[in-house]
Amino acid sequence: MGYVGKWKFHSIGTVDDETCERVWLNREEYMNSPMPYIDETDEEAIADEIKERKRTVGTLLEVCEDGKLYVLMPLPEGVSKEEVEAAVNAGVIKARDGMMTDDPLVWQERDGELWVNMGSSDEFLQFSGDDEFLTMATTRFERLQ
């Protein structure tokens, strides 16, 4: 399987409380799913969680031919182009294709599987993948057409 290309958010895995089995929530389901770990009376905590969920569903993976993998995240809402440029110039953030990113991760293909060095050591994490999806931890991505 060829992993090179861009992959967009498809769904996030969670455990169904009744069946104890993994279920996949699409963008809308995830955005509207309960927040049992958030104090429902804390509006700031709820707003922060919604902001984090928007970032998650807006994430792209870019797997490059040169062995680099970029995790691309949407810029925060309400931030101007000038503010982004100033943050990039100050070294606060990195930008690529109009999105925020960190230093690229190193990837390699081993026996047809995608392995990614997550940056903490020389250990590589295996991503699961097939012709339809690429799964990183609990997040599933689909190839961007």
Image (cartoon, rainbow, N blue to C red):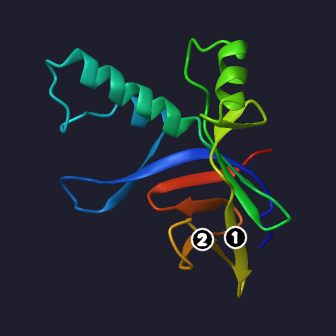
Task: For the residues labelled 1 and 2, say whether their Cβ atoms are less than 8 Å apart.
Answer: yes
Residue at left offset 57%, top offset 46%: 10
List the residue tagged with mark 2.
117
- Numbered mark located on residue 119 in the image: none
- Quarter placement of the N terminus: bottom right
Q: Which type of secondary structure does the marked residue at label 1 adopt?
A: strand
Report the side of 78 relative to 144 (left or right).
left
Specify the farthest residue to the front: 90
Residue at left offset 71%, top offset 13%: 82
Question: Where residue 97 appears, x then y in whole percent?
Answer: 79, 35
Crowdedness near tag 2: few (<14), some (14–19) or many (≥20) residues, C-alpha within 10 Å: some
Amino acid marked by disc 1:
Trp
Amino acid marked by disc 2:
Asn
Specify the farthest residue to the bottom: 111
Residue at left offset 71%, top offset 65%: 131
- Numbered mark located on residue 107 in the image: 1
Residue 127 drawn above or below residue 81: below
Mark 1 / mark 2, whichever is N-terminal: 1
Q: Nearer the viewer, residue 111 or 125?
A: 125
Q: Nearer the viewer, residue 46 or 106?
A: 106
Residue 78 drawn above or below residue 127: above
Question: Where residue 127 appears, x then y in whole percent?
Answer: 57, 70
Question: Where residue 20 appears, x then y in whole percent?
Answer: 23, 62
Quadrant of the rendered structure where residue 51 is? top left
Q: CA distance from mark 1 to mark 2?
A: 6 Å
